[in-house]
Amino acid sequence: MDQLTQVIRILKTPVTLIALLALLFGAGYWGYKAVTTDTGKPDVKCVMTDVGGELTPKSVQVRSLNAGASGGKAKETANFLRSYGFTVIRVNNADDDELVAGTVVVGNAASDPEVRLVMQFFPGSVARGDGRDDHVVDVLIGQGYQTAAKPVTTLKVDGPVCLPPPLTPSASASAGSALPSPSTSPSKK
C-alpha cells in the first residue's frame, strides 16, 4: 500500500498538468472557432415565384421607414399597406442619411415589379434600386408624402417574379429582428 501511495503522489502532478493542458487547448480551440465563425444571418435570396401573370400585395414584403415625416407616420403607412394585403416585416426610422421629401420606394432595381406595385400606392413616389438580393421593398416616408385614395392593387407581369421567400410562422413573429434593413437604425419609431 505504501508503494501505491508513492506512485499516486508521483503521478498526481503530471496527470493534473496534462488535464489542465487539455482543458486549455480545448478552450483555446473553442474560442478560436467562436471568433472566426460567421455569426451573421445567412443571406436571404429571392425565389422565382409564379404569380399567375398578376403581382398582388400578398406576395410582397415591405419595410415602412420614417425618413423625415412627423412621428408615427411609418406605423400609419404600415397599417395602410397591411390593409391592402402587404406583409410588413419592419416599421422603423430610416438612418439620418436617408431623409427624403415625399416617398422613395427602394428595392433591388427601380424597374422590378414589386417596386412598381408599391409605387402605385404612393402618388409621386420615386423608385430607387440598391441591388439587394432579398427583393424586400423599403418605403421611405418623408415630409409631404401621400397615399393613394384608390390604388391599383395588381400589376401585370410576364412570367415568374423574384420575391422574398414566404415568412415562416416563427420568423413572422420576430420579423423585425430577423430581417434588418440596410437603411434602418435602432432609433425610436
Image: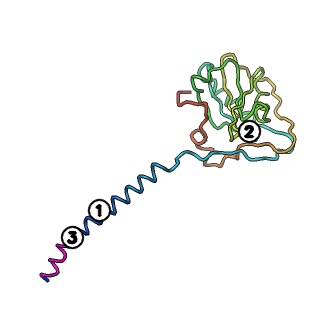
The answer to which of 74 and 16 lies nearer the viewer is 16
Query: Which residue, as the protein is rendered here, is positioned at the far left?
Result: 2
Q: Amino acid at mark 3?
A: Lys
Residue 104 highlighted magenta (yes or no): no
Callout 1: helix, strand or loop? helix
Alpha carbon distance from label 2 to label 1: 56 Å
Q: Which residue is drawn at the image coordinates 81% and 26% (left, top)?
A: 150
Q: Amino acid at mark 2?
A: Val
Marks 3,2: beta carbons within 8 A:
no
Residue at mark 2: 60
User: Splitting the image into 4 quarters, where does residue 60 fall?
Assistant: top right
Q: Which residue is drawn at the image coordinates 24% and 68% (left, top)?
A: 14
Residue 33 in the figure: left or right of residue 94: left
| Circle number at residue 20 | 1
Alpha carbon distance from label 3 to label 2: 67 Å
Residue 118 in the figure: left or right of residue 44: right
Query: Does label 2 or label 1 sit earlier along the sequence?
Result: 1
| Circle number at residue 12 | 3
Query: Which residue, as the protein is rendered here, is positioned at the far bottom?
Result: 1
Q: Which residue is drawn at the image coordinates 55% and 45% (left, top)?
A: 40
